[in-house]
Image (spheres, helix red, strand yellow):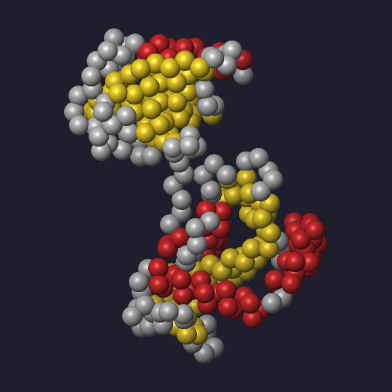
Amino acid sequence: MKKRLALLLSLAMILTFALAACGGESGSGDVADSKYVGTWKPDKLSFAGESEDMGDDFTLTLSADGTGTFNSVDEDGNEEVSNITWSLTSDGFKTQGDAKMTFKDDGDAIVTKILGAELRFVKASEDGEEVVDYIDGAAYGYAGDDPVEAACYQYMVEEIAPQYSEAEISIPTVIIVHEDFTPEDEVLVYGDFWVENYNVDGDTLKSVSGGNHPGCMHVSKSDYTVTAFDAVADGGDFESSAKEIFGEHYEDFMKVYGDSDARAENRKITVSDYVNLNHLDIKYYQDEGWDPVELYHSAE
């Protein structure tokens, strides 16, 4: 670990020097509308098959006029600001000066190499926090704007739905019992989670398969994805595992779990949201052996 930290410090010094040496030249090309304009924070350092998460000691800010700054904090906590200029390349951008650095586009990140090590930067918002690409709720029937809830919908569709018979469309019903935001790196979402797989038959979604998966989802605060799921056991272990997972929220969970009318209403709302968000000409969903259920505000 000490060797790795020493490497990080060494690279930090080199990076600071390289960017600080880039002043005095003007950037070339029109960068005003470039995706790279803004502030970038180092995310991860990779070297010799290993990687290390980076802290907040650096920020790289690129301005629309081709200038920018590189801010660094030394081991004594003193902030240093270096002026830079930058210009676009065919696959990213480069800083200008005696010591040139090249950054390559990596989707939502930019990557540069220093002495064989790869340093990855991610975009930051105006308040300095890392920008997170929130989940598109339309793909899962989620019409809200809470990234934690959206992560639960995504998990049910992408990880749980494939466990059942394949169908054309998967739509979850997520009923949250409690959310715990106290852990530093994650949100604990306790809930009653369902998923249904459907095939389209005219104006009706006909249920093919699906099931119930109550438990606790661990949602990362850094990128709003589910990193783990503590599922309540089936059969004779249901009660004991539910009490262990839900703890003081067990009674609240059982009230939700036993309310079939509320669950049916939540399902109807989610299926309706999915249909409307995706502009489908669907008016009903139907379980085998049951009458069709008319959706809310069906797309015309």
Q: Position of residue 132 (x, y in %)?
A: 46, 44
Q: Would you identify the image quadrant in which residue 275 lies?
A: bottom left
Above/below status of 1 relative to 156: above
Above/below status of 40 relative to 69: below
Answer with left or right where residue 222 lies relative to residue 245.
left
Pick whichever, 207 or 18, lies toward us: 18
Q: State whether residue 183 appears in this view.
A: yes
Which residue corresponds to the image point at 27% horizontal and 36% vertical from the top-left? 34
Q: Position of residue 19 (x, y in %)?
A: 37, 16
Which residue corresponds to the image point at 69% horizontal and 59% vertical from the top-left? 178
Answer with left or right where residue 87 lies relative to residue 51.
left
Instruction: Work out which quarter of the rendered image holds the N terminus and state it.
Output: top right
> How many numbered circles are shown?
0
Which residue corresponds to the image point at 23% horizontal and 19% vertical from the top-left? 26
Pick whichever, 18 or 217, lies toward us: 18
Pick whichever, 179 or 286, lies toward us: 179
Above/below status of 22 relative to 153: above
Which residue corresponds to the image point at 52% horizontal and 90% vertical from the top-left? 291
Q: State whether residue 208 appears in this view.
A: no
